Amino acid sequence: MSDSIYKPTNHNADLLSTPEKLDRVANLVAEGEFPFPTGLSPDQQVLLATEVRKRRHQRLVKFIARSIARDLWQKIEQHNQKGKDYD
């Protein structure tokens, strides 16, 4: 019997063979550094898409939070500067 039976026929199918590989590929796809792989099983597609969505969602939430924090900081600085002008 050939060992090729146990090897994935598609190289991309091996990209998600471990949790570490899934994490790395999901990060790369979410950052736009790697295209969404083709040739994955439907279950692998759903798993990877879910992980990519989680990362993009987290990145969007952090971006919005930082924007709000920056705006608040600028308003505080403006307020403090106005207070110094009256001293």
Image (cartoon, rainbow, N blue to C red):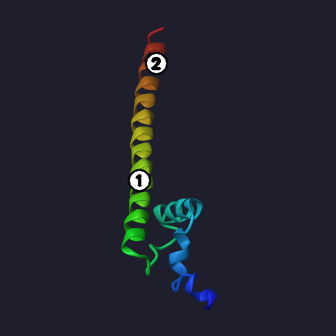
* Amino acid type, residue under disc 2 in the picture: Asn
Residue 44 versus residue 84 in the image, above or below: below
Contact (Cβ within 8 Å) of mark 2 with mark 1? no
Residue 39 x/y as whole percent: 44, 81
Residue 45, given in percent of the width and then of the height, sits at 39, 70
Residue tagged by mark 2?
Answer: 80
Q: Residue furthest bottom?
A: 1
- Measure the C-alpha gap from mark 2 to mark 1: 39 Å
Q: Which mark is residue 68?
A: none
Amino acid identity at mark 1: Lys
Depth check: 73 or 31 in front? 31
Residue at image mark 1:
54
Q: Is residue 18 above or below residue 65?
A: below
Residue 67 x/y as whole percent: 41, 40
Residue found 45% across the figure and 35% down from its top = 70
For the N terminus, the image quarter is: bottom right
Q: Position of residue 2 (x, y in %)?
A: 62, 91
Place residue 3 in its image quadrant: bottom right
Dot 1 lies on which element?
A: helix
